[in-house]
Image (cartoon, rainbow, N blue to C red):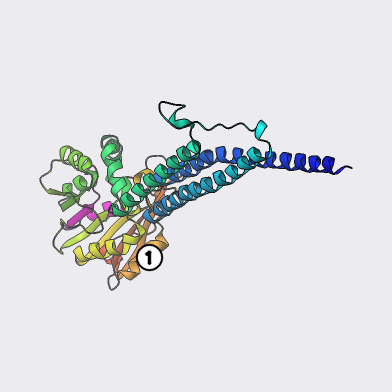
Amino acid sequence: MAQSDFENQKFLASFNHNSENFRSLNQLMWQIPLIAMTLTGGLWFGVSKTESSKLFSACLLVIAILGNVGLVVALKRLRFVMRRYLEWFNSAHPSGFVSAEGDGRWSGDGWFTQAYVVRLVFQWMLIAAAVVSSVLLVHILMTPAKPSSDTSAIRYYDDYAQSLADSYETVAFEDAHPEMARYLSNSRPKHVIDVGAGSGRDAAWLTSKGHQVTAVEPSSKMLAIGRRLHPNGDVAWLSDSLPKLENVSGRDFDVAFLSAVWMHVDEKQRVESLRRLEGLLADNGVIYMTLRLGPTDSKRAMFKVSLAGLRRVAEVSGLKVQLLGQGSDLLGRSEVSWQRVLLSRQEEQPDSHGMLTQQSDVKSKRK
């Protein structure tokens, strides 16, 4: 083969190879905005769905910032390499090289015809996304954390107060709390705090038996309904919630009553809640509560509960747990069941209060 033919073949091979590489680089450059949109959009969506963890949201936004900044650098390097290929094409075959650069003047070909304009547009888009992610990150870090326990639960009860109250009022106290009904029907008058009093159904029954009741309800709309449905002057209504119960004073309650409340208390706040309740009790006071067993409802800020878990928390607070009874849901949900339990100080015997135990054939209440 003649030297000239060999040189021609080598040039053609180089030209074809460089052409393929340039096309690949060009395709990659146009894919970068799609990569950025997918990455940033997915991470922003994750942040919008992760309200409970500031740390996780912050990590997602940091990834979004670093991803967009990294793509800005990648575009810079990619366009630099493409420029070198264009310069080679121009020097290797000037007569066949097509220059697409304008003069960049508004009165000439236009500003958007100058070199690197596409790269600059992409880069500014990526920088804007990184800036927005940074603003969101600062906002999340500067915004005080919402209470992890019952904020969304209160919002839910406010939104559906009337329909929930209607359903609660269809269930009799005796069906919901059979052991307590037997115990409190004929006992001496007691001072009872009903935490999470809801529609006031239980508070009204207790006052009808001669007991003095402090009804505590964090939902303003539910509290208003309770006052309207049960205007008995013997019920003292308060707006408050666990774990602090800041508006409740004294240490003379014979019974702390928590019906369908414990599943709304964050696991991290349960020890504090029990200690606060124990601190409100008289010398022989007890805590009565119902435990909701079954799937939780995220709209109502529910947390898993169990008798074993309650016993572990109660032990830390110096309380003993006694199972009174258990049963199915009175509102007909097959996946939900209830346990009725009594908590007392370690040195006291719950049975001395006349409670019956293990009434598993009686149905429980759901609030």
Question: In x, y percent, where is residue 171?
Answer: 30, 41
122 on left or right of 91: left
Residue pictured at 40% horizontal, 51% vertical: 57
Residue pictured at 48% horizontal, 49% vertical: 67
Q: Amino acid at mark 1?
A: Arg
What span is colored magenta in the figure? 179-199
Q: How many marks?
A: 1
Question: In x, y percent, where is residue 361?
Answer: 41, 50
**Closer-to-camera residue (159/363):** 159
Q: Please rate how many residues cluster around mark 1, counting C-alpha atoms within 10 Å: few if below 14, some from 14 to 19, many from 20.
A: some
**Closer-to-camera residue (43/157):** 43
Q: Residue furthest bottom?
A: 347
29 on left or right of 299: right
Image quadrant in which you'd find residue 331: top left
Image quadrant in which you'd find residue 192: bottom left
Image: 200 above or below 94: below
Residue pictured at 15% horizontal, 63% vertical: 252
Residue beneath label 1, please? 311
Q: Is residue 260 visible?
A: no
Image: 39 above or below 265: above
Q: Is residue 255 visible?
A: yes
Q: The N terminus lies in which quarter of the figure?
A: top right
